[in-house]
């Protein structure tokens, strides 16, 4: 499959090139030239493994052979994505991977891709995290031969459980607790990428969420949902921040997945719902919410969503869920016997508002409730059990180094620890 740059359509690259580069010229997003249309009923009847390899092949061939795709699928997707009935709707649980969030899908497949296409030079994955991405990327690249991972995070501003999940790994995973904010971490990463000499010497790659190799892996679980819920009028509510997950859902629909329509569920950071209503793109300052991974006011995947909508002549129902309704939704889910965290609660509430008679609803559960235990426990007034992955990480030593938000110190760190490795 060839990919083109949405900002400069004449720029076309292979899958491997798009995955290596992340972004095209002018910061344009890469997008498949033509999304393959598959025989949906045949795909839904396949085993999960066969389905995954069949769905991925058109996106990654000819860079990867069928045998290699089999190896990558087996290595990346070692966990399940169960669909659970909740009242008359369905929850698609995407938090059964090692870091208990849906980011394990994209990060683990990306690690498989980069390990095979990175070439002979060094590769350093440099990523700033506000909690979840760092963990998924660190686990995905743990022990990847020749790949060094450096994760920056704001010290004291992520939960203890989040920190322990990725700062205790060691080996090729280095973690830096920055005395500053997430923005400071992002700024440090940006200065490193802006330094061409440093970037090529270390083989820097950001592993960020706009990378096509992460996106194509997220298509898979929308098909898992369709395989579990066989209905003609399936409406899927997607908790949205950067709109990567919704992009993957629209790609699945475009391939023929039997999904009637999508609901884009946001918290009060509602640039997209306002845009769809008024036609004016007017980001406002980002507001902190309980569904903090969706505290995004300039969603960087939006050009892909817009392209898919216009290419297919689809419309999108976007709904805003405020903080009080998020808490109410956590309680409604609990009354139905389901423990949900704030992101899935936003999706559930938006679904309830959007669903029409004759439709069957599903909503995505993007993180384990224990990752957002504070919000869930305060909404429900009781303690949550601690899952084994978190309990195990809590008992380990935090291996992070500390750093001031200082570009020169960061560059020295990158070079000195790189030299140590050589
Ligand atoms: C738990 C959780 N839910 C939902 C989202 C939103 O996904 P997207 O940014 O793809 O819209 C994120 C993104 O970071 C997340 O971590």
Image (cartoon, grey):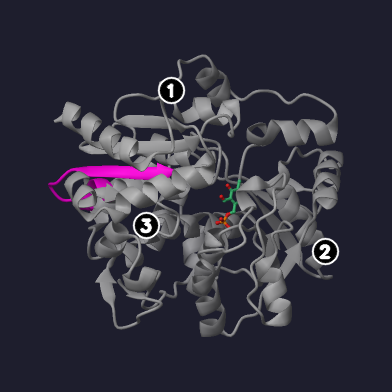
- Horizontal and vertical percent position of residue 98: 48, 33
The residue labelled by disc 2 is 353
Task: Note whether residue 155 is visible.
Answer: yes
In-front residue for pair 128/255: 128
First of labels 2, 1 by sequence position: 1
- The magenta stretch is 114-128
Label 3: few (<14), some or many (≥20) within 10 Å? many
In the picture of the structure, the residue carrying the numbered disc 1 is 168
| Quadrant in which residue 55 is drawn | bottom left
Q: CA distance from mark 1 to mark 3?
A: 26 Å
Residue 235 visible from this viewpoint: no
Judged from the image, the secondary structure of the residue bearing numbered disc 2 is helix
- Which residue corresponds to the image point at 55% horizontal and 70% vertical from the top-left? 253
Residue position marked by numbered label 3 in the rendering: 213
From mark 2 to mark 3, how far is it between C-alphas? 33 Å
Q: Secondary structure at mark 3?
A: helix
Q: Earlier in the sequence, mark 1 or mark 3?
A: 1
Q: Can you tell me whether the CB of the residue at mark 1 lies under 8 Å from the nearest atom of ligand 1?
A: no
Q: Quadrant of the C terminus?
A: top left
Residue 407 placement: quadrant: top left
Question: What residue do we see at 69% from left, 59% from top?
Answer: 269
Q: Which mark is residue 369?
A: none
Residue 135 among magenta residues? no
Q: Are marks 1 and 3 in contact (CB under 8 Å)?
A: no
Does label 2 or label 3 sit earlier along the sequence?
Answer: 3
Q: Residue 131, how many percent across, how many down?
A: 54, 38
């Amino acid at each position: 499959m060839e990919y083109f740059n949405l900002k400069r359509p004449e720029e076309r690259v292979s899958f491997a090139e798009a995955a290596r580069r992340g972004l095209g010229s002018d910061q344009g997003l890469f997008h498949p030239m033509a999304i393959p249309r598959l025989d949906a009923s045949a795909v839904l009847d396949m085993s999960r493994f066969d389905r995954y390899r069949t769905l991925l092949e058109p996106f990654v061939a000819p860079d990867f052979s069928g045998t290699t795709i089999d190896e990558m699928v087996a290595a990346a997707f070692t966990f399940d994505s169960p669909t659970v009935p909740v009242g008359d709707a369905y929850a698609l649980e995407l938090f059964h991977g090692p870091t208990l969030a849906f980011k394990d899908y994209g990060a683990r497949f990306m690690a498989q891709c980069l390990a095979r296409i990175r070439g002979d030079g060094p590769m350093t994955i440099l990523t700033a995290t506000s909690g979840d991405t760092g963990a998924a990327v660190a686990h995905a690249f743990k022990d990847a031969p020749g790949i060094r991972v450096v994760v920056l995070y704001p010290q004291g501003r992520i939960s203890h459980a989040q920190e322990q999940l990725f700062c205790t790994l060691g080996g090729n995973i280095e973690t830096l607790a920055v005395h500053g904010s997430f923005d400071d971490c992002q700024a440090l990463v940006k200065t490193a990428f802006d330094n061409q000499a440093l970037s090529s010497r270390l083989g820097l790659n950001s592993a960020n969420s706009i990378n096509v190799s992460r996106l194509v892996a997220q298509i898979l679980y929308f098909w898992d949902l369709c395989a579990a819920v066989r209905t003609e009028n399936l409406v899927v509510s997607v908790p949205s921040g950067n709109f990567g997950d919704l992009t993957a859902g629209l790609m699945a629909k475009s391939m023929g997945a039997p999904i009637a329509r999508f609901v884009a569920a946001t918290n009060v950071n509602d640039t997209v719902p306002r845009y769809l209503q008024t036609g004016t793109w007017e980001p406002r300052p980002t507001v902190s919410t309980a569904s903090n991974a969706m505290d995004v006011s300039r969603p960087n995947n939006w050009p892909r969503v817009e392209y898919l909508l216009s290419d297919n002549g689809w419309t999108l129902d976007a709904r805003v869920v405020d903080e009080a309704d998020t808490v109410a939704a956590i309680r409604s889910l609990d009354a139905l016997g389901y423990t949900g965290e704030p992101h899935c609660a936003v999706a559930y509430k938006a679904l309830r508002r959007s669903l029409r008679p004759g439709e069957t609803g599903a909503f995505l559960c993007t993180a384990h409730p224990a990752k957002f235990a504070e919000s869930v426990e305060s909404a429900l007034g009781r303690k949550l059990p601690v899952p084994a992955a978190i309990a195990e990480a809590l008992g380990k030593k935090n291996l992070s180094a500390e750093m001031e938000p200082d570009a020169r110190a960061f560059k020295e760190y990158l070079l000195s620890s790189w030299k140590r490795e050589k």
